[in-house]
Amino acid sequence: MNRLRNLLNRILNLLAGVSFLAMVILTCWQVFTRYLLKNPSSWSEELVSYLFAWMALLGASLVVGERGHMNIPILMDRMSPGSKKGLVIFSELVAFLFAGIILVFGGIQITSLAMGQTASSLGIAVGIFYLVLPLSGILNILYTILNIMDIANGAISLDKADNRNQSIVKSGKKV
């Protein structure tokens, strides 16, 4: 399971980096065409906005995989280990349901509706850009399943001090 998680992380990090680089290049192109050529590029502006949405949703999936979402530790710190595990698994199940219902099911619905519309500057079906919704939902579902399995078998520690040490080790710093 760690191999799958590592593969997904590498792919998403690569996609995030490539899309960010593309957005920087396209934004520079927009500035160049608008101010130096006096002929603004409308297609690049539209593409940057779609790339931003893709980067944000795929980045959010990466955060789900790293369990980096916000939480309220004051409640968790006062719970017994068994209760902590149950609550954390419950929160992962809620994320699983959200991803399945809103992102996958809803994303498929909106994507199919948008396939009949064409992006004004790019001439491509808008539904292609909406494909990130179900894709992000599937990634979130995979990550929540991996998280639940790791929490259940103890591979993910729920102790505050252990989590701090794991974060430091992940970042490459020595404890």
Image (cartoon, rainbow, N blue to C red):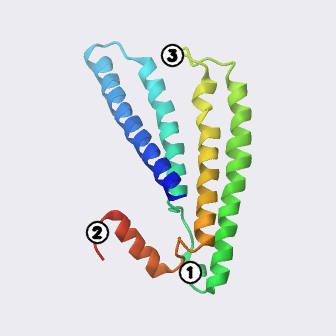
Residue type (three-letter) at the residue carrying disc 1: Ile
What whole-number distance in Å separates the C-alpha atoms at marks 2 and 1? 27 Å
Q: Sequence-wise, which precedes: disc 1 or disc 3?
A: 1
Q: Sequence-wise, which precedes: disc 2 or disc 1?
A: 1
Residue density around tag 1, few if under 14, some if 14–19, many if 20 or more, within 10 Å: few
Disc 1 to disc 3: CB gap under 8 Å: no
Identify the residue position indicated by label 1 in the image.
74
* Residue depicted at 56% across the width and 17% down the height: 124
Residue type (three-letter) at the residue carrying disc 3: Ser
Location of the C terminus (image quadrant): bottom left
Location of the N terminus (image quadrant): bottom right
The image shows residue 10, relative to residue 165, as above or below, that is above
Identify the residue position indicated by label 2 in the image.
173
Identify the residue position indicated by label 3 in the image.
121
Q: Which residue lies furthest to the left in this view?
A: 36
Residue type (three-letter) at the residue carrying disc 2: Lys
* Residue depicted at 37% across the width and 65% down the height: 170
What whole-number distance in Å separates the C-alpha atoms at marks 2 and 3? 47 Å
